[in-house]
Image: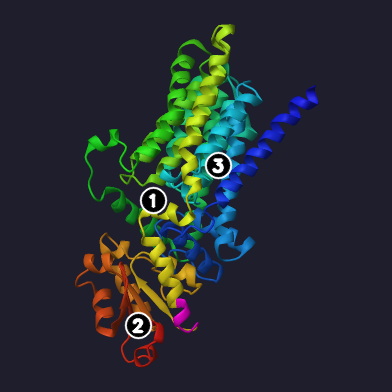
Amino acid sequence: MDELKRFLPVTALIGLCALIVALRAHTYDEPLERDITTYAVIAHEMLNGKNLYSDLWDHKPPAIHLTYAAAEWITGYGRNSIFLMNAAAAVATLIAVYFAGAAGRRGPLAGLIAATFWTLASGDLAIEGNQPNTEVFLNVLLTAAFVIFARAETKRIGLRAALAVGALFAIASLYKQIVILQAVFLCAAYFICVEREFRKKALIEIGMIGAIGAVAWAALFGYFFLGGRGNAFVEAVFTYNRWYSAHPPRAVSELWSWPGLSPDALTVAFTIAALALVGLVIGLKVCPRRGWLLLLAMAIATYITVQLPGWFFPHYYQLWLPVLVVGAAWSVDLLKRTLPARFAWGAYAAAGVSCAVLVMMEIPCYLATAKSWSTQKYGGIFIESEQLAARIDNLVPRDAVIYEWGNETGFYFNTRRDPPSGVTFAYPMQAGPLAPKLSWRLLGDLKRKEPAVVVTANLTMSLTPGHPVANWIEKNYRVLWRTNSFAVMVRKGGELDRHPPIAAK
């Protein structure tokens, strides 16, 4: 019987892992959005020997680029590496969510409920959960750290666990610095919950967690400054991001709203959140509160993390899912234990209803094609850019250089062509503290490696009249053909200008 009790949860977990991989495989061919292709292109250039920040510009800390580089090293450059990260992160978070759900002696059933909710909701179309943006990796790390705290109950986590938590938080901050809030709030909740006799030692453990983060960032600064890239690193990751988070200015009232979330996303979230909220209220009042205080701390930190940057992209809200699914699973376990015996079935009925609603919400998405997912999330821009990239790749010789004045790095990813500059997208040159510096840097790169073809994004051209890069393009290139969102231009007097491809006429 004991072997059966161990076997069934493992079998169920394997089944959920297989299901989540299959769900991610459904959108394997989805045209990739610009964040994904930017990370992939930068990682590819890093593997080819170029340096992050000094040669390749981005305003994210380096962990995301290293992750993409590792995936490419394993599977090669292309969609296989994207799928590997996507599936691996989803499965890793599923396992972490299972252990979080089972923590506090709640048992395998609560863990499986949390894992089931995660499997159904984590790839939701409305929060762009089916592709490996930064949040999917943060969810692995932050949920694993939460598990360590939650499993300790009222005891200390211990020095080894503190080292592990410190490493998890440190790595997470190398994806996004703002997640230090999760570390602060969870450590504060841990200190409050631990028994008084252990608090001095708990402070030492919290100090270790903070010290590991400080050492990690000191090592990162040291690495870049010793390599002569410190100023480039600081400008990209701190100077630009300070400006980015403050522009455009936002009203304080927006901190209490949920911009960027569609009604479908709110429905999915509410399905789980309602159950989690019931448990949170009851748990804080009538039960041992340690786990619920930790969950509340995680929820508050997540709220601030999502709202504070001032940009409300749908994928930011993915950070809420581990909090909600663990809270919902704990609520089911709590209701089962607190309701009268004859009503205990109501706890599982509530979980069943929530799962049924999730299934009904998600089925239409998985009946749609991968291209339809892209259209529903972003409109037609990434389908158009992918198709145009394929057309250009077929018409232009392999040794010809192409450049896109815009933000669609998919032109490089989909054609497997190296960009002529490490400044691969136009946003930081349109406005901000680094706009002049990056613009002249890009212009110098384009003059050294004159592209045979320049693709200009209509939106970018409309936003940059008189920009030195736009002026240079207009002076040296002529339009060969146009699409809805782009103009394809060839160098005046170049081979493609003298002998334009037949298919382009």
* Residue 18, x across and y down, in percent: 65, 44
Residue identified by numbered label 3: 140
On the picture, is 185 further left or further right than 309? right
Residue identified by numbered label 2: 447
Q: CA distance from mark 1 to mark 2?
A: 39 Å
* Residue 117, x across and y down, in percent: 54, 33
Residue 107, quarter of the rendered image:
top right
At horizontal 46% and vertical 66% (from top left) the residue drawn is 228
> In this picture, is 441 found above or below 221?
below
Residue 421, quarter of the rendered image:
bottom left
Number of marks in picture? 3
Q: Amino acid at mark 2?
A: Lys
Q: Which residues are magenta?
A: 393-398
Q: Earlier in the sequence, mark 1 or mark 2?
A: 1
Q: Earlier in the sequence, mark 2 or mark 3?
A: 3
* Residue 8, x across and y down, in percent: 72, 30
Residue 376, label in figure: 1
On the picture, is 432 further left or further right than 51? left
- Bin the neighbour count of mark 2 within 10 Å (Cα to Cα): few under 14, some 14-19, many 20 and up: few
Q: Earlier in the sequence, mark 3 or mark 1?
A: 3
Q: CA distance from mark 2 to mark 3?
A: 43 Å
